[in-house]
Image: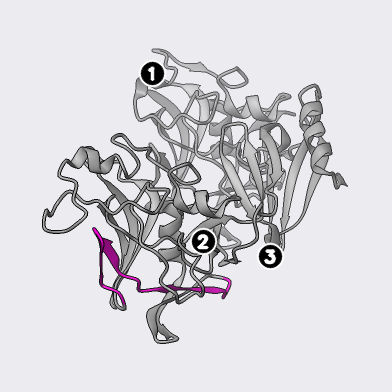
Amino acid sequence: MKVKILSLVALLSAVAFNGSADTKRYVLNVNKTDNTVERFDVSDVKSVNVNPAPDDDRFGSVDLGLSVEWATVNVEVYRPSKCAKAPEALGGHYGWGDPTGERLEQPENPSWTPYEGDRATCLSYYGGAEPLKDICGTEFDIAHVHWGGDWRLPSRAEQDELRTKCTWTKEVLNNVTGYRVTGPNGNSIFLPAAGFRFAANNFGGDYLGYYWSGTLNPNAGFSDYAYSLDFTESRYEWFSDARFIGQSVRPVRDAYNIILEKNNGEKLVYRIDEVEKIAVEEFTTHEDYYEAVDLGLSVNWAAVNLDIDSYDYAASAPEVLGGYYGWGDPTGRNHSKNEQDYPFYDHEVSISGTDLDLLHNYWGGDWRLPTMQEVQELREKCTWTWETVNNKPGYRVTGPNGNSIFLPTSGFRYGDEINQTYVNTHGYYWTGTNVTSYYVYQLAFSQKYQWEYNYRYNGYQMRGVRKK
């Protein structure tokens, strides 16, 4: 295999070229600084982009080792700098969705001013009667409007990441109480207990903290509320608060990172400091690419299981499980538990080597699922020995000529759930042979190997065969 280090432009060219290649394949390797490598088939990659450095660096940010960087201070729109003068400075209290920071109206208590008796009118000042579900980075985002660049309110998910992935320690900084929030990488920010505002009155300073997210409460009947990160001296968690309540704002901005987007819309984000290099690996697939073991039987058996999520569609070693697939699903993605969502026949028939054979579709050539007769031959003509390979139990299957393969225990998948109880005790492998309109033959084993048939919607392993 020849490794090429490509620029991002060249990478995209490789993606385009791959579409017309017959046998050559390209794999995108993301080499990380922790010495791990993530691999992707280039044909599955839509784009790779580097998120540029922030547009506006006037406001300090801290990399906590999370998905976004957090500002060092709160928003304070009445100061010329638009920010609090120090991390412990309280900053201002603002209603959710009020980009001006000037609205103080509330509709719940006539004795407090300013009072707006009509709740709908009052809420129109705070993001509107039908607010956006997420105002982060929009015209309703006070952090984005006043700080500019890519500064914005955090989403609820980003606040929850701060809450669950960081260490929170009560601290007094220059006579101001609050929390020191330390990220996974050891860097930290300070969140002062600034209290909250109701109408024109402030409450709870020095022991309560309320910080808006940009995320509206999506539950039916709760559009008057938005999520916030709230804390006291004894706890820190997110709540849903009325939009007209004045709370603190601690902005975030996107971390300087690499974004890999797949064709299915999935986006993977890598921090710039965790990626050592991106390499494109070129290799050629053909019918001899996957190792076939001659056991002295009528067909040769693959050395590893099928894994369509691996860059080369194969498990990385004989003891590695590979994927769990329903019978007759040519996509490998059907997790339905409805028998009618899989091809069925009312008589014995084999899909081995057809368009319904997932292994044949991915490995090509003459690779295919074994038939019932070929698995029966494996069971009856070989010696089966219970063995553990790299801490994985399974069977060493030795053919009449002395060559062998290893079949790891796998358990099975039912719907989206893998039965963990059986993962290290039982193995289930599909054949291509249908029995009746309900059942398909499988090779099933624990410390006693056996021959069974089962429902086609179960997720089992696949081990291929090819002609000698």
Q: Tags 3 and 1 in contact by the CB under 8 Å rule?
A: no
Q: Residue furthest top?
A: 346
110 vs 374, nearest the viewer: 110
Q: Secondary structure at mark 2?
A: loop
Closer to the camera: disc 1 or disc 2?
A: 2
Work out how far the residue at label 2 is from the one at label 3, CA to CA, in angstroms.
Answer: 39 Å
- Please tell me whether mark 3 sits on a helix, a strand or a loop: loop
Residue behind mark 2: 82
- Circles 1 and 2, Cβ within 8 Å, touching? The answer is no
The disc labelled 3 sits on which kind of residue?
Asp
Sequence-first tag of 2 and 3: 3
Query: How far from the left and from the top, in percent, is residue 285?
Result: 79, 32
**In this picture, residue 301 sits left or right of residue 357:** right
Q: Is residue 265 positioned above or below 233 on the image?
A: above
Q: Within the image, what quadrant is residue 134 found in?
A: top left
- Residue annotated with mark 1: 436
Is residue 160 among the parts visible in the rendering?
yes
Residue 136: within the magenta? no
- The x, y position of residue 31, in whole percent, is 74, 55
Mark-to-mark CA distance, 1 and 2: 73 Å
Determine if residue 297 is in view. Answer: no
Disc 3/disc 1 C-alpha distance (Å): 51 Å
Q: What colouring method underlies this structural image?
A: one colour
Amino acid on which disc 1 is placed: Thr
Question: Mark 3 highlights which residue?
Answer: 34
Image height of 321 relative to 209, above or below: above
Give me the residue at 26% from left, 42% from top.
123
Which residue is located at x 50 percent, y 68 percent? 73
Dot 3 or dot 1, earlier in sequence: 3
